[in-house]
Image (cartoon, coloured by chain):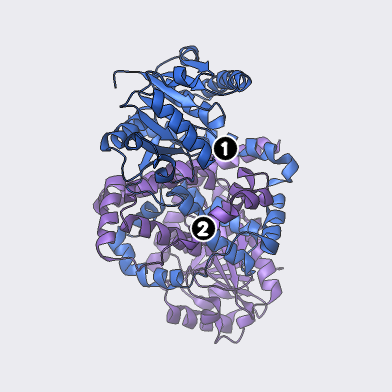
Chain colours: A blue, B purple
Amino acid sequence: MASKKIAVIGSGLIGRSFSMLFVSGGYQVSVYDVEPAQNAVAKDDIWSQLNKLEEQGLLRGSLSKEQQFANITYTEDLAECVNGAFFIQECIPERLELKKSVFAKIEKVMSPDAIMSSSTSALMPSLISGDLTHKNRFVVTHPTNPPFYAPATEVVPASWTDADVIEKTVALLKEIGQAPVLLKKEINGFVLNRIQYAILAETWNLIRDGIVSPEDCDVIMSQGLGMRYAFMGPWETAYLNADGLHSYSDRYADMIYGIQKDFLPPEKIGGETLDVIQRGMENVAGPVENLEQRRQWRDRRLVALAKLKAGMNKEEAK
Amino acid sequence: MASKKIAVIGSGLIGRSFSMLFVSGGYQVSVYDVEPAQNAVAKDDIWSQLNKLEEQGLLRGSLSKEQQFANITYTEDLAECVNGAFFIQECIPERLELKKSVFAKIEKVMSPDAIMSSSTSALMPSLISGDLTHKNRFVVTHPTNPPFYAPATEVVPASWTDADVIEKTVALLKEIGQAPVLLKKEINGFVLNRIQYAILAETWNLIRDGIVSPEDCDVIMSQGLGMRYAFMGPWETAYLNADGLHSYSDRYADMIYGIQKDFLPPEKIGGETLDVIQRGMENVAGPVENLEQRRQWRDRRLVALAKLKAGMNKEEAK
């Protein structure tokens, strides 16, 4: 990787986040968008976000915000954006045909050993890359939103992805302070959404069957389970709740399996139960018209938690 | 509720937590244990915990730690403990026959309008209370551990539980600063463990099938989903990720249902996959011999998060 240039395709929210992450690691970023006006919006927003990160003490890397800002350039010329880049991160809307056609254009102008990476949250890497000439250079890199505060990032190869593409993508993510999660095979929904949808499936049934209200269901997470999940996953939770997992299994495996077998089949979201949950969430988070206010409430907390975790880890590393 | 006396049956970890919660609300607590030595240990530990809570700024209520400590008395006489109490919280080991026999003794000496509450995490209220004369005064009150830092508390009635038992139990929990979650009907595993086991079921299959390592699986939670779940449940997460739940459903319902239908059946924890996860967690959390150290690591974070949330809520309420 002699080149320090990374191409970011699309200057929406995800494209801006990736651009800032890459420059924090000392890379030169070229952002492509079809619309000059979009690029101008992105540039302003990135400057504002870099300032916020600095204020929060969460600016990453050793460069100043001015240096990081200066290392991002903007173009409406795809070839210019991709030319000489060793890593190309696509961040365009979630439409399969659109992504396929953009990657078909990208591979014609990229260095043959460059990496093509898609930020898709749902499309299978084999579907996006199957028709590409250089499909072996393709991988999915799916961030959590917002990536600066929730650094888990799924890396999902197709069966034909070169080993060095996977290794280099994981290494790059680590270098810029993200937490890469490698999927060894592609699977529908990847890991993050499968976990999320397993929770939705079970809680949907509990709410539909009148066991618990939507508001109380959410309290179980936000005032119970979620307090732990901010710091550790489900398996470490189990590991610490007994004396390791064999002791956990001895004590609870039968009981857990009995409950899991009792789960009712999933039901498609919609109808009356959806209305009930919608009303419940209006009680918790306010009406849809004021969602932006609640999103800011959420983001202040994500920032504070990210700072808390970074601070405690730093303190304890001493 | 003219009486301000609460009986706590069992002076183990959960009994101590409940005792401290109740005195923080200005109640008089009588703790029962068969063993005088156990009561002595509990008394020392409660004093030490009250001191810690004060240091952390998390002591609840308007009484000083000395006053709270003085409002807990200890006895090895069950009748003395229960006599005159309006609320009786059982915190003894998780064995059905033991609980049944203790409640049979309790109901003989309690006020007829008192509430019998069990802290069981897994036994159905109908099973514990079915043979009692005053089974209509029985309810389950299942805390998350540690209750001072993860306040969600499940309230689970049997079909025969009096309405005022449920109302008063929910009101009492709110008064002492807990976050009650009311189950309208009993169900195996209640809500908290059903959510937890839905996550274990899906992640077990992903790890078994070689999609993801146990370590990376946990990163998806601790560095991704769990950052949100510290503050909001799965349904508010969805609500804010679109413009309310109808917009969420329009965009994602088909995709989500497609993935949920794709979930493989649960498998009982054990065998080779358990060994793989055990080794993964040793990498993350250290060997089983050093678990106490990692539990302290976890508890420092739970305390810090509880403080963070309380502080932000207080600040924003101004």
Closest to the observer: A232 or B303?
A: A232
Q: Residue at x 29, y 55 (%)?
A: B277
* Residue placed under numbered mark 1 in the picture: A301
**Numbered mark located on residue A53 in the image:** none
Does residue B57 show up?
A: no
Q: Examine the rendered structure and indicate whether residue B98 appears above or below residue A215.
A: below
Q: Residues within 10 Å of mark 2 (few under 14, many from 20)?
A: some
Quadrant housing the C terminus of chain B: top right
- Disc assigned to residue B258: 2
Q: Residue at x 45, y 39 (%)?
A: A142
Label 1 vs label 2, nearer the camera: 2
Q: Secondary structure at mark 1?
A: helix
Looking at the rendered image, the quarter that the N terminus of chain B falls into is bottom right
Q: What residue type is disc 2 on?
A: Gly
Position in image of residue A106 (x %, y %) = 43, 27
**Quadrant housing residue A55:** top right
Under mark 1, the amino acid is Arg
Residue B81: percent from left, percent from top: 54, 72
- Residue B241 position, x and y percent, is 60, 44
